[in-house]
Image (cartoon, rainbow, N blue to C red):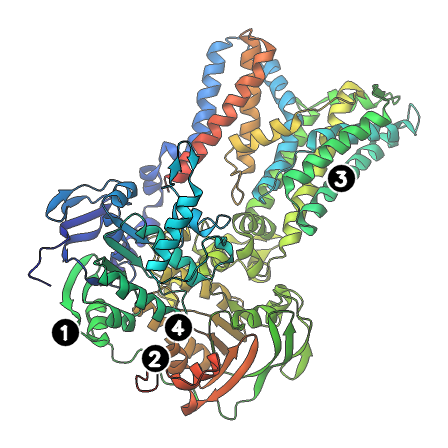
Amino acid sequence: MTNRSPILELEGIVKEFSTVRVLDQVNVSIYPGEIMGLVGENGAGKSTLIKIICGIYEETSGTIRLEGKEVRIPDYITAKSLGIGLVPQEFNLINYLTVYENIFLGNERKKGVFLDKHKMREESKAQLESLKMPIDVHRTVSDLSVAEKQMVEIAKAMVLDARILIFDEPTTALTSVEVQHLFALMRKLKEKGVTMIFVSHKLGEVMTICDRVTILRDGHLVSVDEIKDLDTTIIARKMVGRDFSQVFPDKIDSTGKPPLLEVEGLTCPNLLRDVSFTLRKGEILGFAGLVGAGRTETMETLMGLRKMSSGTIRFDGKPIKISNPREAVEHGLAYISEDRQGKGIVMDYDIPKNITLISLKDKYVKRGLIDKHREERSGREYVKGFNIVAASHKAPLRFFSGGNQQKVYLARWIDTKPRVLILDEPTRGIDVNAKREIYEFIHSLAEEGISCIVISSEMEEVIGMCDRVYVMREGRIAGHLEKEHITEENIVFNATGIQKGIKKDGRA
Amino acid sequence: MRPGFKKVSRKMGEHKIKNYIKNFRIKDHSLGMAFIVLFVIATIVGWPNFLKVRNLTNILRQISYTGIIGLGMTFVIISGGIDLSVGSMAAFVGGVSIFFLNLFGPDSTLALVLTFLFALVFGSLLGALNGVMVAKFKMAPFIVTLGTMSIFRSLIQYFSNAGTILSVNMGFGTLGSSMFLGLPIPVWFFIIIGVSLHVILNHTSFGRYLCATGANEQVARYSAIKVSLVKFVPYVITGFTVGVTAIMWSSRLNCINPSDCAGYEMDAIAAAVIGGTLMSGGKGSIIGTMMGAVMLGIINNMLVMGGISAFLQQAVRGFVIIVAVLLQYNSDSNK
């Protein structure tokens, strides 16, 4: 591969945002037909780098060469015309339009002044077929699953004959089966000679799919290595800049702990059927299952965000009724949603305002007015206690990294003094270091006697943290695993109903 | 990287004032600047009449009617809604209140107090009607209030037989036209309601919930905020402000014409928007709305003194609104 000339060369790329240098002298060469992994902690400069390649940002200094020729990429349209495509993390699809209309959005085929719908349909069909994507081009995008939407994004980039395709954390919202499909697709694109850049936090996936890996740290290039010279530990070490052997703290033994929350026969039309489980005092309980298995819906029903048609909830042995989130909070329940930006933080609020949003009335209001000094003091305490990195407490949260936003979100619920803390995908989209901090934090909460429920699609998280795990499938509890029975195989079996280890080559 | 950040934040505490001056950017205070510039221009254009106390109090009186409603409107817009019905509602409440007042005969002073309370309650109820449809039945605020706008206007025309509704009470007229400590009564209401709503918006949990709900309803719901209540209340507050304006306006004229107060919604919305309230919700300022209302008044006053046709005044107002939104859009996209 190295004897060929590179398709894309980045030389001495520097990017500064008002004197803050976020990328410093980055040199990378990418060769045709390879899959280049791009990893680094949040804030390492991954997104900035790909945004420069796509023309969304312009580099402060440095040169970009495409097939040996120096190019300037002032905007995304130019990038597209140069054959650079982006599959964004957040999809840019229009929900009300059909698949083929989305694929040709901004690039419509025309017959005179009219749209040539027939041609667009045919070309979309051909494109999807050549990529072996079984999607009907007439469906509206709002009816598609996350994985299918991603396929449409890929097809959209490919109709422009993209030679370089950038995947920005493509597997965040996918199940493990869908990830396998995506990888198969990427291999197919590779056969066609498409060069790909794969940005991900999931090191296992990087090891599986990439040929080489570029590692960034604090805006500097750490290394570019062949995949055969790496393993996940080496990558993690290079990303963080130091060793950390164990990501997960020791497990907490839940045996013999008294039950705190007992849920029985929870039913919610079309979503949940007869969900029963018990949460013990001070334990970390796992909820595993595929995306859409009903884990989030179970917790939302528990929090009074959805109406249940039948079922009983017992708290500390006494039956309770929860019909709205306020009542759930009053009973000491807390729920950290998986959708941090859509359902969690207020992007325009600063740290103190975000933290006190729920506990405001109970703790910060004196004679009808908000005690702003107290609010700010409390904010400062949490910033210190949670190790939140912030230039200013007064800055709106939209300027914070995912990990810091998540910590603020956590702080808000901790401020309500919960007895049960439900965490829905608590580490989604945040870097290794912040992840470990959050694991340790959950652990210390449980030790203090707060019962935690962790919903996670990342199996190693559930396996590494929890002493007991419920596995859900299609709105029901499909299995209950304890201690040494919490294995990848058992979870997958219960989650899918298929007895097949996805990583066991012999049986698969 | 971390210690660096800490140093910065400590520094900010020590040299707060110094930093304030250093960080003072005209862009952050664009409304205040615009206000001053406008005032200076008006002073020059309208020299010497503009600066006369009589003229200034007149401006304040003129803007107070729609200004008061603009205060309530600001809350509605922050919540993510809009209320188009306020103009018709003002005429409707005003008319019905005069009917109510006339029940007591010509000399009752008690009737004045009761009528004022009646108008406040009646306005709040009509606002609650809008609020229920928006918050409880989850209908689009634009459609709901477009509907009630038409309903209220039609009802007052029907009840008045398309004629003027005259007050028979002798004291009614003094309410709206008297002065108190040098300022007209409606201006006092404008100030008192403005200060109250400013405190509610910035210093109470309700204000906090209002902004959170307007910024992102889902976030608010998941934060145990009673979203439907938070979306309902602004319409009631707006109805209340309409009640105040209805009395102030009708007592000034001692009557109500069924076509009165048409287009008030435009001025109320304009004051809020010029004052920096985001049309998409989540962010707004009562002080801004008050300044916005006064600025509209100054512009009008300037046009009158400059001898510009009354027919053109609406065009200028429209232009100012568009420029205000344009500035808002630009400062937002710069983020």
| Disc nearer the start of the sequence (4/2) | 4
Question: Which kind of residue does numbered mark 3 sit on?
Answer: Leu
Question: Which kind of residue does numbered mark 2 sit on?
Answer: Phe
Q: Chain of mark 1?
A: A
Question: Which kind of residue does numbered mark 4 sit on?
Answer: Val
Kindly identify the residue that appears in the image at 43 percent across and 81 percent down.
A492
The one nearer the camera, A386 or A22, is A22
Residue A375, position as x, y percentages in the image: 49, 57
| Disc nearer the start of the sequence (1/2) | 1
In the picture of the structure, the residue carrying the numbered disc 4 is A177
Q: Is residue B96 left or right of residue A22?
A: right
Residue B78, position as x, y percentages in the image: 56, 42
In the picture of the structure, the residue carrying the numbered disc 2 is A248
Kindly identify the residue that appears in the image at 84 percent across and 19 percent down.
B163
Name, please, the residue furthest toward the top. B307
Question: Which kind of residue does numbered mark 1 sit on?
Answer: Asp
| Disc nearer the start of the sequence (4/1) | 4
Find numbered disc 4 in the image and state the secondary structure of the residue it sits on: helix
In the picture of the structure, the residue carrying the numbered disc 1 is A229
- Measured in 3D between alpha carbons, the distance from the residue under mark 4 to the one under mark 1, in whole angstroms, is 27 Å
The one nearer the camera, A349 or A325, is A325
Residue A405, position as x, y percentages in the image: 40, 59
Residue B126: mark: 3
